[in-house]
Image (cartoon, grey):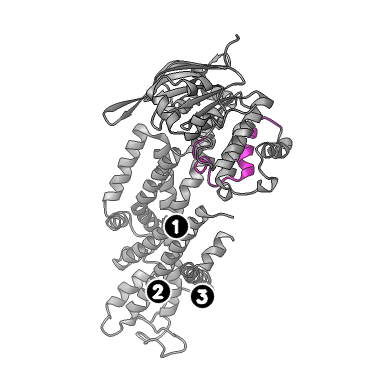
Amino acid sequence: MSEPLLAVSGLTKTFRNGGRHVLAVDDIGFELPAGQTLGIVGASGSGKSTLARLLMRLIPADSGSIRFHGQDWLALSGARLRRARADIQMVFQDPLSAFNPRATVESVLNDPLRIHEIVGKAERPARIGELLDKVGLAMSLRGRSVLALSGGQRQRLALARALATRPKLLILDEAVSALDLSIRRQILELLVALQREDGVSYLFIGHDLAVVRAIAHRVTVMEAGRIVESGETEGIIARPQTSVTKALIAAVPQLITGTESRPG
Amino acid sequence: MSLFARLAAAPGGRAGLTILGLMAFIAFAAPALFPGDPLRIAGPALLPPFSSSEFPLGTDRLGRDVLACLVHGAQISLLVGLAAAAAAIFVGMVVGALAGFAGGLVEEALMRVVETFQIVPGFLMALAFASVLGASLPIIILAIALAAWAEPARLTRAQVLAIREQDYIAAARALGMHPLEIAFKEILPNALAPVLALSSVIVAGAILTEAALSFLGLGDPNVVTWGSMIAEGRNVIRSAPFLSILPGLALVVTVLGVYLFSEGLADTLRQNGEERP
């Protein structure tokens, strides 16, 4: 098997809170092959979002290594890091605070195209139209303020923004948790379809195993900054080895009857 | 609806706009309405108001036209108020933004300076400054600005610090946006709106400070101001109280107008943040 798209090992991050040290991410390691989805589940406070921010290089890691697309991801800095950021994008948990309140739909999508010179200036309006179409947003929304969008529309816009740079890896941090069930279903189907078409890899972070099951090939369970269990999604759900995983399964009634699983 | 239209739709904002508009018109038209030096002797001394058609608001101890003085005084009050507030807010925003972006030692040093200015009573500082450097309009403006820049500096810094932690800044970084672009395009425009809402309160304070300085005889002696008119009227306050009351009223109305305007502006900006079409 060739080198995985993303290989993380020994990743550690400690936050200092007053005099107290909090180990938010403790010696985490995993691999994600290209075109696949890895689910990361755990209760709130288990270090999932910190992990996402470490992978995005939004906060510095204390130790550990991240190999992404054949390069040492933690060694990049300055302009080279900014350029490389096109390859890893993220959809944030809160669709409200993820946009500049002064932005319009058009300007949100224009930024990534402009910064990474994805297409020439003249072709940007057309590309913005394609992106909107891809995530199922109406063209008539282009000139709208992001504040005038509904939660579901915002999350679609966040997805379109993340896809604009044509990333190889998309980190979805509780990306559907704030949405109601029907919109959640639509977004998940959209993600699966996009992966089939473009071969994007997903790191899907969530607390709801039913949702993670609908999209992830493999799943990793975290607790207090550590990985407690990982494996094939169906295997983990059918034969949970730890009390943490059992509790997460017990929290989702439909998993016991097994109605939802990854389509396609 | 535009910001201006919304401001005009709120009762407080409309009253503020009307008063300020009127004052600005009077100030601009002063040289045309009452040509010549308002401080020249124009008629008999201590003429009471509404007794002569030539001097509708009467004359003072030296026979100067009170209405002409009031109108020319509006010019100075608004000029000093606006210039001092503009200077205070500009300096405050620059220092506050620097502190917020730089962090570390630079932030510590800048904020200690800000606090030093903040703990000295503003009026005393302006008073000391004007009495040491002498009374002229630019010095007065500088003195008032010096006493007022600490608050916008603190607010700007707090805004920058709060906005830096927002997800949309993380999103901009994740997109690979240049740090300077993040500072100027993503953070500053959002940080400055509340600071600008503070500006009219500072204008009101500056107008009052200028009046108080003039009242104490530290104003520019070559121009007529409402404060100096009140001080001048004080000498004859038993026989001709109107000489102090009229400029006092002008001061009250102007400050009230500025205040109403600022409240309306702050409300409108808040609504703007909540529901934008």
Crowding at label 1, few (<14), some or many (≥20) Cα neighbours within 10 Å?
some
Please check whether the numbered discs 1 and 3 fall on a single chain: yes
Queried whether the magenta region covers residue A94, the answer comes back as yes
Q: Nearer the viewer, mark 2 or mark 3?
A: 2
In this picture, residue A195 sits left or right of residue A240 = right
Q: Measured from the top left, where is residue B200 in percent x and y?
A: 43, 60
Instruction: Give the residue at x 47% y 51%.
Output: B193
State which chain disc 1 sits on. B
Indicate the secondary structure of the residue bearing disc 3: loop
Q: Secondary structure at mark 2?
A: helix
The image shows residue B137, relative to residue A187, as above or below, that is: below
Where is residue B68, by image quadrant? bottom left
Task: Residue B63: give x, y in percent of width and height.
Answer: 38, 82
Q: Say whether mark 3 and mark 2 are on the same chain.
A: yes
The answer to whether mark 2 and mark 3 are in CB contact below 8 A is no
Q: How far apart are the two marked residues, 2 and 1, measured between alpha carbons? A: 19 Å
Q: Main secondary structure of the magenta part?
A: loop
Closer to the N terminus: mark 1 or mark 3? 3
- Tell me if I can see residue A13 in this picture: no
User: Callout 1: helix, strand or loop?
Assistant: helix
Q: Nearest the camera: B87 or A207?
A: A207
- Is residue A153 visible to us here? yes
Q: Is residue B128 above or below residue A52?
A: below
- Which residue matches tag 2? B250
Cα separation, mark 1 vs mark 3, equals 24 Å
Q: Nearer the viewer, mark 2 or mark 1?
A: 2
Q: State the residue position of label 3.
A: B35
Instruction: Say which residue label 1 marks.
Output: B83
Residue B209 got which mark?
none
Quarter of the image where the C terminus of chain B is located: bottom right
Magenta stretch in the rendered image: A92-119
